[in-house]
Amino acid sequence: VVKLREDLDASLKKAQSLEDELQHVKAGQAASQQQMEAAKEHPSSQNDEVEKRWREEVEGLQTKIAQLEEESQQRLNQVREKARAVMTKLREDLDASLQKS
């Protein structure tokens, strides 16, 4: 049970880390969006290059977000499985304890 608890804690920390990274990437995407909107307000020949770079950056960020969301979902599923294992073990231990008494 102690080992399962440690595994569960580690999984929860990893899931939180992925969630933090996802929020960071989303914030970066929002900043890029604001830069693009500002560039549209001031037309110039540089804007075409800025827009191209921005689109590439957004595509990269969208890919990263999708990857992080997938990793986060996988980690969440692992945490759920470990939690089920802990609960099953606790029930078994409780049943065994009750049968002894």
Image (cartoon, rainbow, N blue to C red):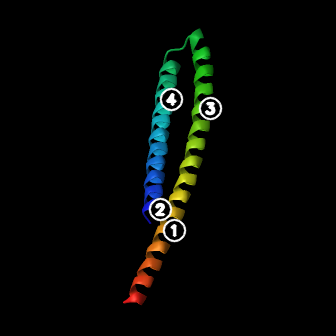
- Residue 68, picture quadrant: top right
Q: Are the residues tagged 1 and 2 within 8 Å (C-beta)?
A: yes
Q: Along the polypeptide, which appears first: circle 4 or circle 2?
A: 2
In the rendering, at what x and y percent does residue 99 appear? 42, 89
Query: Please, is residue 30 above or below residue 79 in the view?
Result: above
Give the side of residue 98 with respect to residue 62, left or right: left
Q: Nearest to the eye among marks 4 and 3: give it.
A: 3
Amino acid type indicated by mark 4: Gln
Work out how far the residue at label 4 is from the one at label 2, CA to CA, in angstroms. 43 Å
- 21 sits to left or right of 63: left
Instruction: Tell which of 17 and 19 is nearer to you.
Output: 17
> Sequence order check: which comes first, mark 3 or mark 1?
3
How packed mark 2 is, by other alpha carbons closer than 10 Å (few <14, some 14-19, many 20 or more), is: some
Q: Earlier in the sequence, mark 1 or mark 2?
A: 2
Q: Are marks 4 and 3 in contact (CB under 8 Å)?
A: no
Of badges 2 and 3, nearer the viewer stands 2
Q: Could you say which is closer to the camera, residue 82 or residue 101?
A: 101
Q: Which residue is mark 1?
A: 85
Query: In the drawing, what numbered circle is on residue 33?
Result: 4
User: Mark 2 — residue?
Assistant: 4
N-term mark: 4 or 1: 4
Residue 73: image location, x then y, percent: 55, 53
Q: Nearer the viewer, residue 70 or 44?
A: 70
Residue at image location 58% in from the left, 53% down from the top:
74
Q: Nearest to the eye among marks 3 and 1: give it.
A: 1
Q: Mark 2: which secondary structure?
A: helix
Q: Which residue matches tag 3?
A: 59
Q: Closer to us: mark 4 or mark 1?
A: 1
Q: CA distance from mark 3 to mark 1?
A: 39 Å
Residue type at mark 3: give it: Glu
